[in-house]
Amino acid sequence: MDILKWSEETSILIKGNQFFDGHSLKWKELSEVISGKLTNVNPLQALKKLAEGNSLRRVPIAIIGPRDATKLQYKLAEDLGRAYALYGLQLICGGKNGVMEAACKGHLEAGGTPIGLLPDGDFECANPYVSIPIATGIGPARNALIARAALVLVAVGGGVGTISEMALGLQFERKILAMKDAPQLNGVIYVETVEEAILHIANKIFDLSGF
């Protein structure tokens, strides 16, 4: 199991003789010994500390799901979007209603800047919680852009459109998480809670095993 340590003095995340470069999202060799107290941290704590120091490059993490979300799906997507913001994760989604709206709402209200990649050619078609609407004008083909741009995709429920995004994500070798009656596909990781989803995302960002 990889052991993570945090230097309060230098605000650096350390693993063995390496430190985590939050801009490139890569581990790099330490050129000098880090002095001062080192505290053991888990991946969630490490992610939170990097977010608090604004030292994590905001590579998009997607939330995908249906426009006609159930109340439970809407609540879960809102909670997930909020968690993204609290852990310094950049939300990208389809920018429309349902799960997408809920994710943007949670993200925005927690201080995030949600990106909506719209199928429409008019930015005004975005839900009211999208901070950065990108009007692609290419219709459902925008699903491929989301799948390619995101480091991880989390599906909350979903139908045919969500299946296409999940399948494209798998084709692009992205990590795909699924929650709340999301379609079942080989290669997808199914999680029960928001915290579990964030932990998987943290493990992907930090390239960790054993957690």
Image (cartoon, rainbow, N blue to C red):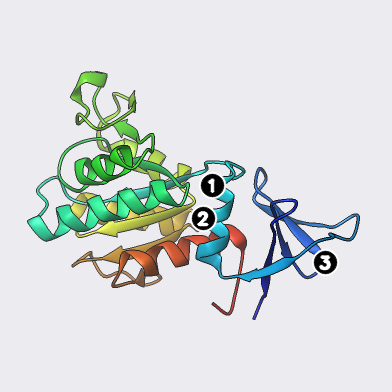
Badge 1, how many Cα within 10 Å: few under 14, some, many 20+? few
- Which disc, if any, is residue 48? 2
Q: Alpha carbon of mark 1 to alpha carbon of mark 3: how far?
A: 24 Å
Residue shown at the point (29%, 58%) measured from the top left: 155
What residue lies at 85% left-to-right and 60% top-to-bottom?
35
Dots 3, 2 in contact, CB < 8 A: no
The image position of residue 158, as x and y in percent, is 19, 57
Along the polypeptide, which appears first: circle 1 or circle 3? 3
Q: Is residue 200 visible?
A: yes
Image coordinates of residue 141 in percent, x first then y, are 31, 37
* Front-lying residue, 129 or 151: 129
Q: Amino acid at mark 2?
A: Lys
The answer to whether the residues at label 1 and label 2 have Cβ atoms under 8 Å apart is: yes
Q: Please state, as top left, top right, bottom left or bottom right, where the C terminus lies in the image.
A: bottom right
Camera-nearest residue between 167 and 30: 30
Q: Quadrant of residue 189?
A: bottom left
Viewer-nearest of discs 3 and 2: 2
Task: Using the rendered view, name the quadrant where residue 67 is placed.
Answer: top left
Q: Label 3, on which residue? A: 17
Image side of residue 71 versus residue 60, left or right = left
Q: Disc 1 marks which amino acid?
A: Glu
Dot 3 or dot 2: first in sequence order is 3
